[in-house]
Image: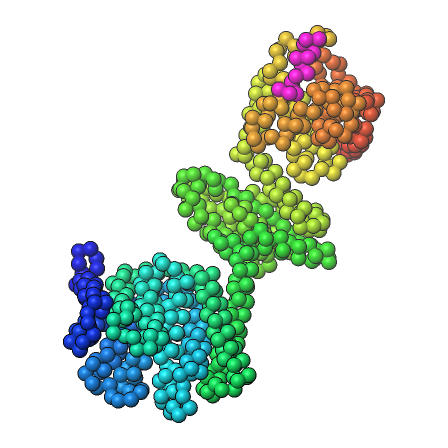
Amino acid sequence: MRVARHGRPLAWWALVGLLGAYAAMTLGAPEDPEARLALSALYSALLAGALVLCVGRARADRREAGAWAGLGGAVLLWLAGDAAFALGFAGAGFPNRGDALWLAGYPAAAAGLALLVRARARTPLGALPWLDAALAGTAASAVVAAVAVEPGDGPLEVAATLAYPLGDVALVALAAATWLALGRRARALVLAAGALALYGAADVARLLAAGELGRAPIEVMWPIGAILVGAAAACPAQRVRARREGRRRATVVAATLAATAALMLLAVDRHAGALPAIAVDLALLALVLLLARLGLALRENTALLARSREEALTDALTGLGNRRALMAALDDAMAVAHAGRPQMLAVFDLDGFKAYNDVFGHSAGDVLIEHLGTRLAAAVAPAGRAFRMGGDEFCVLAPDHAAPDALAGAAAALSEEGEGFKVDASVGVVSLPHDAQDAESALQLADRRMYRAKEARPGSAARQSGDVLLRALAERQPLLYEHVEAVAAMARSVAAAMGLDADGREAVARAAALHDVGKVAIPDAILSTTGPLEDDELAFMRRHTVIGQSIIEAAPALKHVAALVRASHERWDGAGYPDGLAGEEIPLGARIVAVCDAYSAMMQPRPYGEVREEAEALVELRRCAGTQFDPDVVKTFCRLRAQARRRRQVLMSLT
């Protein structure tokens, strides 16, 4: 096709000019044979132009050749029908050869539109629009049969009488379904559908006009339809996605109107009994088609529901189960675990992925996540299942007997290294039902253990921040550094004996190691004083827990430790500092640190205290239990020291 500089085929602009001339003659020319002949010639030229554009597009675009051949074939058949009537070849009576040509254009047009929809729509419309078109056409034919069919009409005449409304209504229904389902973005489809709708509407309007054809505006509708077919052929190819909501709306409206018309006809026949048999049969056929479309709609809705459920449980990027799927699977795993078959839950969080995203961009990060997710699913199958909870966090659920292989495979699958990057994963593992009794608590515990492992890594923010603070403390007060290291080791043991979970034990140990970090802000003269402190010096010294909290909170990864440090010098009886908390108002971790700190202070040389024997220190702790210290913590601490003493004695006896 020859194309103008602005992109439209020249034949299309010629059609626009012919349409203007046709409209002017139709609305202003007198009713005489010469004017009617000129109008017929112009109309034929318009159809011929549309045919040329369709043929040109079919030759230029092999992928859509069938669609444009169908639409062009419909235009050719309508042009041939008009020529047959104009040249007297149509024959006499009704139906005749011209009717046969016109009617043959309907299936050709419908086939062309269907093929064009198939080529342009990214998601198919499905069978419902076509079934609804047949339903609408059948119901319309039933109405026409009830009004227009005479008792003496022969079968061929009846068929021809009903074929026109059937074809017209079917074309309008298909056009409406295409418009509602695909929207304005599918320009070629909308133009082609609009052309067919105009042809159908013009036929209906002509039937209702009852002979007022001469200068009626409806005569312009047919050439406009030809122009729209040409415009559709001139549009560039553009694929669009079908809108489910629009498709459902179109099908429901068509089915409702058709069913209403069929039921009304059957009601009239039931009470009056005067309708032709063909009208009743067509109304019954419309109801049969309605039942078929209801069954088809039910099947589509069932498939849509199943697909929606699958999408709701699937991570879109990796194809793994999402958090919702994990919780459902975890509930099932808990039931299996309580039945005597232990299960394992592992939560993985990628290390180094944020740096990868920062360097290579989020698109590359998505590709890496998809790649790692695919590898993870393969690594834990068939015994286990993999899930993606979002971001860079994954989960694995597997039977306990398969846990070692699943963990090893998952760790390998979630590790990747390349030029300028390294990604691996921290993991938190929970045994079911030993570590947790329900799905939510199991996931929370695994998550906490994973973050504890992440923070314990040499490069983690919490580890780095804590090491920096401890190094500053060691440079300032070497003896104080030795003290807090000893307190941290004892505090971790006491926390474990009192039933704290892994992340709780780690938080207590971290608080014990950092509980005196605020003393870096205390003058050396006060720290090295051997006698009683003055009131102002004592007040200054008691600020060290608040200062420590402020220092620690500056590191976000240690924020959960800061509150324990602040409360580490509170007393059970409420006489401590800085807030005067009492009893269980004091966090348990801080109560543990207080006992371990006091014991270590009594056992190590310090400027303001004498070194005591272990037995004396334990007696002092018991004496202060219930006033300065939590009695339960003191009891647990003393029990652990006794166990340690017995172990030492056993070892000495062996040597």
In the image: residue 17, left or right of residue 595: left
**Is-magenta flag for residue 119?**
no
Please name whichever residue, 270 or 556, is drawn nearer the observer in this view of the structure.
270
Tell me what residue is drawn at x 35 percent, y 60 percent.
186
Rendering coords of residue 289 (x, y %): 49, 78
Q: Main secondary structure of the magenta part?
A: helix
Q: Is residue 73 visible?
A: no
Rendering coords of residue 185 (x, y %): 35, 58
The answer to which image quadrant residue 45 occupies is bottom left
Rendering coords of residue 560 (x, y %): 63, 32
The answer to which image quadrant residue 168 occupies is bottom left
In the image: residue 295, left or right of residue 505: left
**Is-magenta flag for residue 544?**
yes
* Colour convention of the picture: rainbow
Please name whichever residue, 159 or 145, is drawn nearer the observer in this view of the structure.
145
Rendering coords of residue 367 (x, y %): 43, 49
Q: Which residues are magenta?
A: 535-547
